[in-house]
Image (cartoon, rainbow, N blue to C red):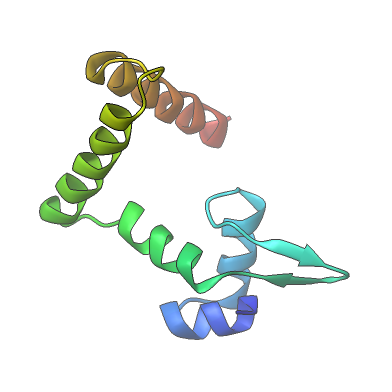
Amino acid sequence: MTPEQVADYLQLATETVYRLIRQRKLAATRIGRAYRIPREDVESFIVANSTREEVRALLFRRVMEIADRSPEAPDGDSLLEALEARDENRSGKRTN
């Protein structure tokens, strides 16, 4: 999808989509002078930014299932702490 198509799909301004891409909140591939955004990444963005508690709980369960399948992955508490630290770092960068 192009940024214009994503903007139309999400009912956002096109500049907002470009800003999300620049902030690395929305994954995109640059081909020449144009961006392309896979539909799966748009759907992931929607889920990851949902305020619905059941969606966030489902996303958390999926992360924990992946961690359980990976023997070299840290335990759930360590993983949660690492993700929270990453969130805090990102938040700090946005406010500066």
27 vs 88, left or right, is right
- Disc tally is 0
Residue name at image x 18 percent, y 55 percent: 55
Q: Position of residue 53 (x, y in %)?
A: 12, 51
Q: Quadrant of the C terminus?
A: top right
Looking at this view, name the residue that lies furthest to the left: 54
Q: Is residue 55 above or below residue 60?
A: below
Figure quadrant of residue 94: top right
15 vs 89, left or right, is right
Whether residue 38 is visible to the viewer of this picture, yes or no, is: yes
The residue lying toward the viewer, choosing from 2 and 90, is 2
Q: Is residue 84 above or below residue 4?
A: above
Whether residue 11 is visible to the viewer of this picture, yes or no, is: no
The residue lying toward the viewer, choosing from 85 and 31, is 31
38 vs 62, left or right, is right
Figure quadrant of residue 18: bottom right
Residue name at image x 56 percent, y 30 percent: 93
Residue name at image x 31 percent, y 14 percent: 78
Q: Position of residue 88 (x, y in %)?
A: 42, 25
22 vs 54, left or right, is right
Q: Position of residue 38 (x, y in %)?
A: 57, 70
Residue name at image x 60 percent, y 79 percent: 1
Figure quadrant of residue 44: bottom left
Q: Position of residue 12 (x, y in %)?
A: 47, 76
The residue lying toward the viewer, choosing from 52 and 37, is 37
